[in-house]
Image: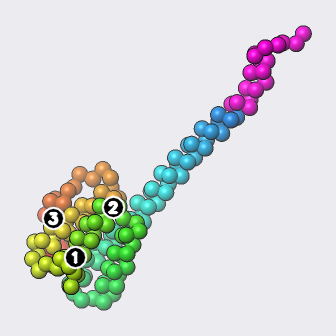
């Protein structure tokens, strides 16, 4: 005796439907994980770049040609890897410290304040949960010579 109606069709289709749903779920889980992996990879690139930049900034005042070349390269890399806020802060900082920059300012306090905003922005890029702000970083900056 053969069954008729919807029940036999569902019974026969169930393995296919389960495989289809499983495939769709796996695709979304995989896509989400890939996106998270890419973000973590970008954060890793930013950490290295930003650490090198912060280490290079104090050397710029010494006239070190290698430091100046590295700084120029890192500025370009920030355009590619940095967040919008970090790019804007870098632009403002560069104007203040680069001789001949449109906003070149000899006032050390202004440059240190700009550096603090840049450092805070860089930290937010690599540590989204950071509690430190520009004021706290200004007070902690070891770079008395950038001014």
The image quadrant of residue 52 is bottom left
User: Chief secondary structure of the magenta span?
Assistant: helix
Mark closest to the chain's N terminus, 2 or 1: 2
Rendering quarter of residue 14: top right
Which of 131 and 76 lies nearest the eye of the viewer?
76
Span highlighted in magenta in the image: 1-18
Real-space Cα separation, disc 1 to disc 3, in angstroms: 18 Å
Q: Is residue 133 left or right of residue 125?
A: left
**Looking at this view, is 86 or 112 the one in front?**
86
User: Which residue in the protein does label 1 denote?
Assistant: 95
Which label is found at residue 138? Answer: 3
| Disc ID at residue 105 | none
Q: Is residue 13 magenta-colored?
A: yes
**Residue shown at 40% from the left, 66% from the top:** 81
Q: Residue at x 66, y 39 (%)?
A: 23
Residue with the most extreme front position: 102
**28 vs 96: above or below:** above
Position above or below: 144 against 87: below
Q: Please, is residue 46 above or below residue 97 in the view?
A: above
* Res 48 seen here: no
Instruction: For the residues labelled 2 and 1, say whether their Cβ atoms are less than 8 Å apart.
Output: no
Viewer-nearest residue: 102 or 61: 102
- Structural distance between the alpha carbons of marks 2 and 1: 17 Å
Q: Residue at x 52, y 46 (%)?
A: 32
- Secondary structure under tag 1 reads helix
- Seen at 37% across and 79% down, the residue is 73
Res. 69 visible in picture:
yes
In the picture of the structure, the residue carrying the numbered disc 2 is 84
Q: Position of residue 22 (x, y in %)?
A: 65, 36
Residue 125, image quadrant:
bottom left
The quadrant the C terminus occupies is bottom left
């Amino acid at each position: 005796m053969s069954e008729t109606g919807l029940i036999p069709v569902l019974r026969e289709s169930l393995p296919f439907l389960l495989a289809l749903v499983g495939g769709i779920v796996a695709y979304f889980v995989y896509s989400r994980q890939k996106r998270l992996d890419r973000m973590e990879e970008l954060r890793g690139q930013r950490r290295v770049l930003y650490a090198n930049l912060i280490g290079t900034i104090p050397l710029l005042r010494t006239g070190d040609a290698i430091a100046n070349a590295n700084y120029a390269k890192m500025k370009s890399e920030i355009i590619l890897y940095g967040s919008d806020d970090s790019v804007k802060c870098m632009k403002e900082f560069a104007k203040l410290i680069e001789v001949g920059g449109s906003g070149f300012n000899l006032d050390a306090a202004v440059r240190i304040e700009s550096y603090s905003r840049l450092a805070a922005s860089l930290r937010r890029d690599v540590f989204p949960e950071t509690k430190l702000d520009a004021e706290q970083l200004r007070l902690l900056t070891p770079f008395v010579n950038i001014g």
